[in-house]
Amino acid sequence: MAAAKKKSKAKVKAKKSPAKKSPAKKSPAKKKSPAKRAAAPKKQATAPKKAAAPKAKPAARPAAKPKPKPVEAPARGPKPGEVRVGVVTHYYGHLSVAAVRLEVVLAVGQTIRILGHTSDFRQRVDSIQIEHESVQEAIGGDEIGLKVTQHAREHDVVYRVPA
């Protein structure tokens, strides 16, 4: 065979070393002499101090009144007689409609209470919709649309208030 081409190795670039700082040049600057301090005034010899008279104790404070206990907020939860109806799964703000997954029967005309972390309000059920169709009553397991008067949030619990 004729002259075979030799494979040339790739050249490796030398690594750059960090730039070294040149030593600081000393300039032939004149050294300043330290500023002279003003002489401290000499203490005059005084007679030895007399023993100080014992200080009178400050007047005793009146006994501190015990702080009143903070008023406890009413318990957050269902009130006696309220029945859990379902849970809000979504809220449509532009329509003021809450999507509610029911656990028991709910009918138009009943009063409900929606209770959550930041919401707590009562209202009368004016309309219920299932799949965009108005109905008078919905049973447990249904996913309904419920027109609400205030803002409801996901995971808020819906209770039926006794009449």
Image (cartoon, rainbow, N blue to C red):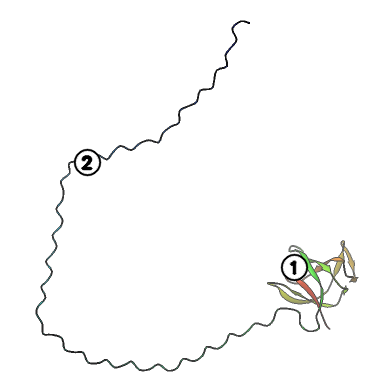
Q: Residue at x 63, y 84 (%)?
A: 72
Query: In the image, is 117 to the left or to the right of 162?
Result: left
Q: Work out whether mark 2 precedes mark 1 in sequence or the reverse, and give the earlier one.
A: 2
Q: In which quarter of the image is the N terminus?
A: top right
Q: Residue at x 85, y 78 (%)?
A: 110
Which disc is residue 26 wearing?
2
Image x and y of residue 57, in percent: 32, 92
The residue tagged with tag 1: helix, strand or loop? loop
Tell me where residue 38 sits by quadrant.
Answer: bottom left
Q: For marks 2 and 1, give the one nearer the viewer.
A: 2
Image x and y of residue 49, in percent: 15, 86
Q: Mark 1 sits on what residue?
A: 155
Query: In the image, is 76 to the left or to the right of 29?
Result: right
- Return the residue nearer the eye: 78 or 134: 78
Q: Residue at x 57, y 14 (%)?
A: 6
Q: Residue at x 13, y 69 (%)?
A: 40
Contact between labelled residues 1 and 2, with CB atoms less than 8 Å apart: no
- Residue flagged by tag 1: what amino acid is it? His
The residue tagged with tag 2: helix, strand or loop? loop
- Residue flagged by tag 2: what amino acid is it? Lys
Tell me where residue 108 sits by quadrant.
Answer: bottom right
